[in-house]
Image (cartoon, rainbow, N blue to C red):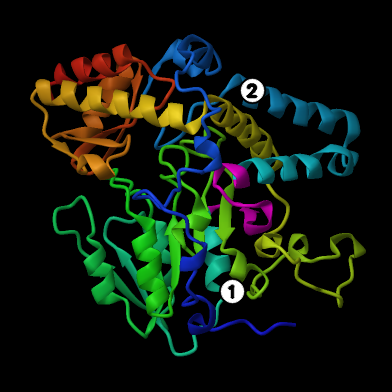
Amino acid sequence: MVGRPVPGELAKASRADELAPTTRSGVSSASPHLSHECPTVIDLDATRSEFPILERKTYLNSCSLGALSRRSEAYLHEFTERWHDMGASGWYRHWLGRIEDLRGRVAAFLGTTPRELALLPSTSTALAVVTESVQAEGRNKVVCTELDFPTLAYQWAVKPEFELVVLRSPDGVRIDPEQYAAAVDERTLFLATSHVFFTTGYEQDLAPLAQIARDAGAYSLIDGYQGAGQVALSLPETGVDFYTTGPLKWLCGGPGLAYLYVRDQLVEALEPRITSWFATERQFDFDLEGFAYRPDARRFEMGTPALPTVHTALGGQEIIDETGLDAILARNEMLTGRLIEAARGAGFELRLADPTHRTSIVMVRHDDPSGAVKHLAEHGIIVDYRPGFVRVSPHFYNTEEEVDRCVDVLSRYRP
């Protein structure tokens, strides 16, 4: 077996010669999901007809859970029918193939290859697998931020051997790259943070963060669950070592599944210390004494995947791919701008990223966010809240009228 590498051996290895000219997110103009073959205008009627919830509700909560499509329902029905008809035989004749169909689509969407993509039950599992795949070698420091989703920090907060450094935001919206550079040093094992902050919608530039980690011999680990599907992204061009995301939110695929990207140079060099029979090269030999890691990112996988979500995620991913991410980004930018303008016009105070780092997560300050969300729900409008704020997140299937109605109903709420 190959010994697990220490951070200085691989994480510091520069990939500058492989990087194409990039935008702020580390995405080259040649990214496959930004192809000129993608439509630039969305057929809104056809798109909305795919999502039954839009016939019943004004749904503006995609950053919590993406809408379920008829396509996903059809795949789920296919899965259950084959289960009824074939039982376990469905694994060999259909379901293993569906897993690889999804892996291939997601990899292409993220600008990478199936070799670099593992399917896991959750981001928490992905973080645990990554943590148990690297050697600390005297490094016991993890740098994250107060704006990250808690599951990121919890991974190391429960491990007393680690020092968890939590960076503070200067304005409650962002973390400056200089803060990471000052905190990451020769004792750092991971620079671990979010692509998009879940309560501010601020999109971080990944390439500088990857470089900061690499220069210190540390690993860069990015929680991208709020990123994929609402920002432009080609993972190899960012230089990050690990990136987790999944179908739950902007990819409209449902809960129970996460995707883990592992930079190509690290795939075969790392040997996870927590594993499963899906991670072994000869899976169906059932040889207790003959474990050998798969030669690709499947070595990081953890047991039987959630097949219902594999099917719903495939349906959502197909719709995203067919719509085209460039068209989705353009529409989301328009809807978000309209939401911001309407909310300000109604007298609301907003917590926003600057326009160059802004996404479709809009935080509306409110004295009673829980009550306001309930009030909106009584009028058939679904949003969410976080402490001190109502959180509204339009997606490509929403309309300007829905955004306007949300603001109008919210402005009429009196605690």
Q: Secondary structure at mark 2?
A: helix
Q: Position of residue 198 (x, y in %)?
A: 33, 46
Q: Looking at this view, name the residue that lies furthest to the bottom.
A: 138
What amino acid is found at the position of numbered circle 2 in the picture? Arg
Q: Which mark is residue 190?
A: none
**Residue 109 painted magenta:** yes
In the image, residue 246 lies at what x, y percent?
53, 45
In the rendering, which numbered label is found on residue 71? Answer: 2
Residue at the spot 61% in from the left edge and 36% down from the top edge: 313
Answer with the quarter of the image where residue 293 lies.
bottom right
Q: Looking at the rendering, in which quadrant would you find the C terminus?
A: top left
**Residue at the image point whose x is 38% and y is 52% from the top:** 195
The amino acid pointed to by label 1 is Ser
Magenta stretch: residue 20 in it? no
Q: Position of residue 305 (x, y in %)?
A: 69, 49
Depth check, front residue: 46 or 205: 205
The vertical placement of 120 against 371, above or below, is below
Residue at which label 1 appears? 133
Q: Which residues are magenta?
A: 107-122
85 vs 107, nearest the viewer:
107
Report, in whole angstroms, how far the alpha carbon at label 2 lies from the one at label 1: 37 Å
Residue nearest the observer in this picture, 9 or 89 = 9
Question: In this picture, is 183 found above or below 365?
Answer: below
Side of 410 where 236 appears, left or right: right
Residue 3 against residue 146 in the figure, above or below: below
| Viewer-nearest residue: 268 or 283 | 268
Badge 1: residue crowd in 10 Å (few <14, some 14–19, many ≥20): some
